[in-house]
Amino acid sequence: MRRSIVLAVFTGLLLVPPPSVCAFGDTNSKVLRLVKSGGEAFSKKNYRRAYKDFKRASAEARNESTDAALGWARTSFHLALFSEARQASLHVLEITADSSIAEELSRIHAWNVLGLALYQQYVDDEFERVFQPHVDDGESDQAVLAEAEDAFRAVIRLTSASVAQAFYNLAEVLTRLGRNEEALETLMQYFSLMGDEDASATAKGLKCYLHYQLGNRSRASHGSETIVPPRKVYSSAPSLPALAQQNGVDGTVILEAIIDTSGSVRCLRVLRGLPLGLTEAAFAAVHNWRFEPASLASTGEPVETQYRLKIDFKFQH
C-alpha cells in the first residue's frame, strides 16, 4: 500500500495531520511559546486549548506565521468552526505563496483543510435548506463545491496522486455535483491505494451508493406509484464519543440509507458529518438498525428505497 502521508478520518471526509510545530522558524518568542503550547495541547487532543493558543499565536504574528495559521485552521476544523478553518487555511496559502519547497507540506495541509471547510460549508447550507425550506438555494453553492474540487485536486497534484484520502474527498465533492461516473472512477483510485481491507466504512458506503445510483445492479422502476416510507422497528442510540464530549463538540449527523426489501440497511452514505468521531459513531449505530421496509401503497409489496436519517448528539454542558 502506497501512502506518503498518514491521514485521519473526520466528517466522512479526511484530514491531513499537521507538520511538526515550529518547523519553519517563527522568530517571535511569544509566538513560539504559543505555537509550542498549542502543539502540546493538540497532541493530547485538547483541541479547545490548542485552538486558543494557535489563534492567539496567529494574531501575535499578524497572520504571518505558517505554523500558527495552520494550527488554527486544523483545530478550528476539529471544533466544527468551519468558517474559521477556511479563513485560516487561506492565510497559510497566502503566507506560503512564494515560499520554498520546505513549506510545500504546509500548502498541502492548507489546501486540504480549505477543501474540507468549503465542503462542510456547502453541507451545512444544505442542512439549513432541508429544515428551513425558505432558505434560498443560490448559485453560490455550486461555486463553493467547485472551489472545494479545486482544493482537493491541488492536494492530489502536490502529492503526486499518492494520498488515497484526497481521492475520497474529491469523490464526495463530485457526487454532490452530480458527476457520479467521475466520482466512482475517482473513488476507485482511493481503493486502489488503500485496498478493500483498510478502506474506511464511509468510503465503502459511498462506493455502494454510487453503484446503486449508476444502476450497476438491476432494480425495478415503480414509476409514479406512491411508496409508503420505511418505518424504524429497532434502533440503538449512538453514544457521544469521549473525544467530542471532552472538546464540547455536538450536533446533528445526517445519513442516507438504502433500505432493502427485508428492512436491513444495505448502503449508508454520509450527507452531513461532524468531527471527533461523531460521524463514525452514527455510522456504526445505524448499520444495525432494522426497518419495516418501504412498500407500494397499492399492493403492499416491499420495495428497496433511499431514506434519510437524522442522528442528534447533545453535549451535556
Image (spheres, rainbow, N blue to C red):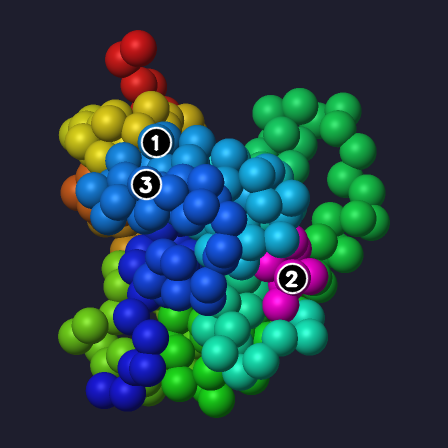
Q: Residue at x 27, y 40 (%)?
A: 41
- Looking at the picture, does residue 11 appear above or below residue 127? below
Q: Residue at x 68, y 70 (%)?
A: 97
* Residue, disc 2: 95
Of residues 253 and 265, the one nearer the viewer is 253
Q: Could you give the CA–CA distance between mark 2 and mark 1, rounded to whole angstroms?
A: 24 Å
Mark 2, other Cα within 10 Å: few <14 / some 14–19 / many ≥20: some
Would residue 301 be counted in the magenta stretch? no
Q: Could you give the CA–CA distance between mark 3 and mark 2, rounded to whole angstroms?
A: 22 Å
- Residue 54 location, x and y as percent? 45, 41
Marks 1/3 in contact by CB < 8 Å: the verdict is yes
The stretch of residues the image draws in magenta is 89-96
- Looking at the picture, does residue 257 appear above or below residue 315? below
* Residue, disc 1: 49
Q: Residue at x 39, y 58 (%)?
A: 22
* Residue, disc 3: 37
Of residues 307 and 183, the one nearer the viewer is 183
Would residue 95 be counted in the magenta stretch? yes
Q: Residue at x 36, y 57 (%)?
A: 21
N-terminal of the pair, mark 1 or mark 3, is 3
Task: Left or right? Give the position of 226 relative to 309.
Answer: right
Magenta segment, principal secondary structure?
Answer: helix
Q: Give amino acid for label 2.
A: Ile
Q: How many marks?
A: 3
Q: Residue 277 has which mark?
A: none
User: Which quadrant does the N terminus fall into?
Assistant: bottom left
N-terminal of the pair, mark 3 or mark 2, is 3
Q: Secondary structure at mark 1?
A: helix
Q: Give amino acid for label 1.
A: Arg
